[in-house]
Amino acid sequence: MFRALIIAVPLAFASVTIPVAAPALAVQGSSAQCQPNAQARQRGRGIGGMLGGMARGLGGRMGGVAGMLANNIPIAEMLGEAIAALLDQCEQQKAADATDEAIRGGVGTTVAWQSETRPGVTGQSVVTAQEQEAGGGDCMTVTDIVIVDGEETRAPKRMCRRPPSTRYVRV
């Protein structure tokens, strides 16, 4: 019980600070929001990884609200470091959405996307395999393909859904 409180308190404060930061972002234009900012991206990955890890740990033990919090962190759970490092914030969101849509389509589904902020940046997610786990969950192999100025990067990843969760997460 005490361990759950230690983990839940930072999550509660994190949910309070997020709405406060949102108005500051709304002041900037939409194109300014999507410009790459390496320092902010690195800081965001660190904070997101920490909060995501705490939410996953709490969600795995308790379910309920904590499980719901863990399921609402799609970008960090959908993209690998190799792909995320090549993309700005808007492109990362498009890649995560493409992965999510491809998973819904099943094996053989390919979903392509194109950057609105940088010419010459495109990508796609391809579901290449699916298998059932012994515990009742199922897993898919998804290959992310990103092309930046003609250079292709491929990153296969394993995405699993374990009951009672309805969302696939990278494992």
Image (tube, helix red, strand yellow):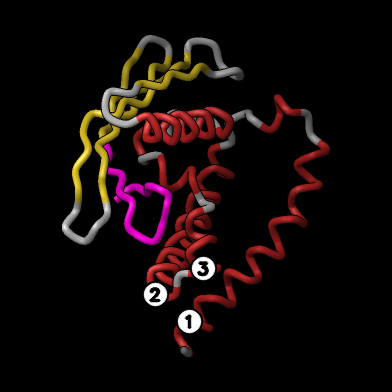
Query: What segment carries the magenta color?
Result: 157-171
The kind of residue on which mark 2 rests is Arg
Residue 29 image position (x, y, % from top left): 78, 29
Return the disc, 2 or 1, that comes first in the chain's sequence.
1
The kind of residue on which mark 3 rests is Ala
Find disc 3 in the rendering and name its residue. 66
- Residue 56 is marked as none
Q: Residue at x 53, y 34 (%)?
A: 93
User: Disc 3 on helix, strand or loop?
Assistant: helix
Find disc 2 in the rendering and name its residue. 61
Asked if disc 3 and disc 2 are in contact, CB closer than 8 Å, the reply is yes
Return the disc, 3 or 2, that comes first in the chain's sequence.
2
Find disc 1 in the rendering and name its residue. 4
Residue 30 image position (x, y, % from top left): 73, 28
Number of the front mark, 2 or 1: 2
Q: Is residue 25 magenta?
A: no
Label 3 to label 1: alpha-carbon separation:
10 Å
Q: Residue at x 37, y 29 (%)?
A: 105
